[in-house]
Structure formats: C-alpha cells, structure tokens
Amino acid sequence: MCLEQNIPFPKPVIENEIQASGRITLRLPKSLHAKLIMLAEEEEVSLNQYLVSALSVNYGQCDMLYKVTEKISQGIAHIRSSVGELNRDMRVFTKASHAMQSDFSAISSEDLIIIGEQPTDIIRNRWTLDKSELTRV
C-alpha cells in the first residue's frame, strides 16, 4: 500500500527499553484473591491467564480512552477555530450592514424612482439597488 501511494514506510516503533522479567509479586486482600480465583475457574483458565487478560483489557480500554479523548480535543479545537472565523465574518458583515443602513437612512421616499417590475429595482441619484446588491453608480 505504501509503495502504491509512494509513501515512505513508517519506521518501527521501539517500545521503552525497560528490562522486564515478565514476573511480578502482588499482594491482594484475601477476599479479592478469592473472587479472582472464582472468576478464573468460571472462565476455565488459570488465575495467571485471567489476570493477564484482565490487565490487557484494562490497558486497552485506557489506551482507547486516550485516543478518543485526543480525537474529541481535536474536534473541539476545530470547532473553536470555525466559530472564531464565523465571528470575524459576522463583524465584517455587521459593519457593512450598518454602513448601508446609514446610507439608506439619508434617502427620502421622494428621492426614489422605481425602474423595474420588482420593488427592489430602485434608483436614486448616485445609488442603484438591484435585488440584494447595493452599488454606487
């Protein structure tokens, strides 16, 4: 797939080079130890296999939670950026709208001449309004 898309092969991920024997000594409350033995027996596996499986599932859930949290954070950052852009656009639009309102408030009804079939097609000395566009003539 990398060759087809002319993408360099990713470098292998090197795990932390912590020397681990694969063995741990763990002290548990007797009640927890007994429950874990019962759960392992129900699954028909050794206590060691059950604990390794349970730890792996927990690690996977934590890893998944981290990945989901990262994706959500990226989504929130994108939304914030988009909202900021929309706010800037709205400020520009509002300024333009106020400027147009000021210009139109100075126009009296006697200054208007209807030049088309639509009431929006009007002209006044130096202004033309055609549908939604306002331009100086």
Image (cartoon, helix red, strand yellow):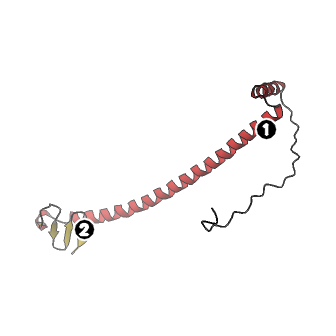
User: Is label 1 in a helix, a strand or a loop?
Assistant: helix
Q: In the image, which is nearer the foreground, mark 1 or mark 2? A: 1
Task: Give whichever of 130, 98 is nearer the camera.
Answer: 130
- 16 vs 1, left or right, is right
For residue 65, which numbered disc appears in the image?
A: none
Quadrant where the N terminus sits is: bottom right
Residue drawn 75% across the image and 25% down it: 42
Of mark 1 and mark 2, the one earlier in the sequence is 1
Task: Give whichever of 65, 131 is nearer the camera.
Answer: 65
Residue drawn 25% across the image and 66% down it: 133
Residue 67 horizontal/vertical position (percent): 64, 49
Distance Cα–Cα, label 1 vs label 2? 73 Å
The residue where tag 2 is placed is 134
Residue drawn 66% across the image and 67% down it: 8
Residue 44 horizontal/vertical position (percent): 78, 28
- 57 vs 105, left or right, is right
Crowding near pointer 1: few (<14 within 10 Å), some, many (20+)? few
Task: Give whichever of 99, 44 is nearer the camera.
Answer: 44
Residue 37 horizontal/vertical position (percent): 81, 26
Give residue 125's quadrant in the image: bottom left
71 relative to 34, above or below = below
Quadrant where the C terminus sits is: bottom left
- 90 vs 33, left or right, is left
The residue where tag 1 is placed is 52
